Amino acid sequence: MPAFAQTAPPVPVDAADCKAQEAVLERDMALARSRGQMLRRRELGDELAALQARCAALVPPVPAQGRAARIEKLEQEIRTLRAELDRAEEQLRGLRSESP
């Protein structure tokens, strides 16, 4: 199992930094997911959530249209996570059903 450096990401100073760091974390999450590193993916998800919370303070209040877009984005993320969970549960069932 490779060791991952536990370095803290730089503190974002503006919305562009937030988006850049968010993109890096999302890319790393996709890579971890493709490698079956669910714990790493979850850790990156936690980092992403923390980054988004920090970035929320940098962004001015969003108008109603932006709010609707954020709701849609979150709903899509939930659908994606549920599909990922379904795949992981299917893999687990398959492993459990294999004879040792």
Image: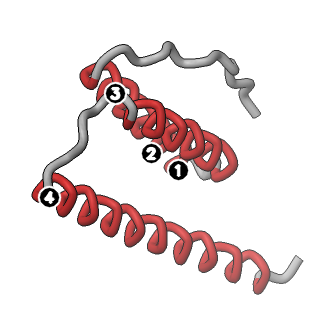
- How many angstroms separate mark 2 from mark 3 (CA)? 26 Å
Which residue carries the number 2 mark? 30
Q: Residue at x 32, y 19 (%)?
A: 17
Mark 4 vs mark 2: give the one in front.
Answer: 4
- Disc 3 is placed on an element classified as loop
**Dot 1, crowdedness within 10 Å: few (<14), some or many (≥20)?**
some
Name the residue type under label 1: Arg
In the drawing, what numbered circle is on residue 33?
1
Quarter assignment of residue 99:
bottom right
Establish if 2 lies above or below 97.
above
In the drawing, what numbered circle is on residue 64?
4
- How many angstroms separate mark 4 from mark 1 (CA)? 33 Å
| Dot 2 and dot 1 residues touching (CB under 8 Å) | yes
- Disc 1 is placed on an element classified as helix
Establish if 98 lies above or below 46.
below
Q: Residue at x 54, y 46 (%)?
A: 45
Image coordinates of residue 58 in percent, x first then y, are 34, 27
Whichever of callouts 1 and 3 sits on the residue coming sooner in the sequence is 1
Whichever of callouts 3 and 4 sits on the residue coming sooner in the sequence is 3
**Dot 3, crowdedness within 10 Å: few (<14), some or many (≥20)?**
some
| Dot 1 and dot 3 residues touching (CB under 8 Å) | no
Q: Residue at x 45, y 73 (%)?
A: 83
**Dot 2, crowdedness within 10 Å: few (<14), some or many (≥20)?**
some
Whichever of callouts 2 and 3 sits on the residue coming sooner in the sequence is 2
- Disc 4 is placed on an element classified as helix
Left or right of 69: which side holds 30?
A: right
Name the residue type under label 3: Leu
Establish if 40 lies above or below 59.
below
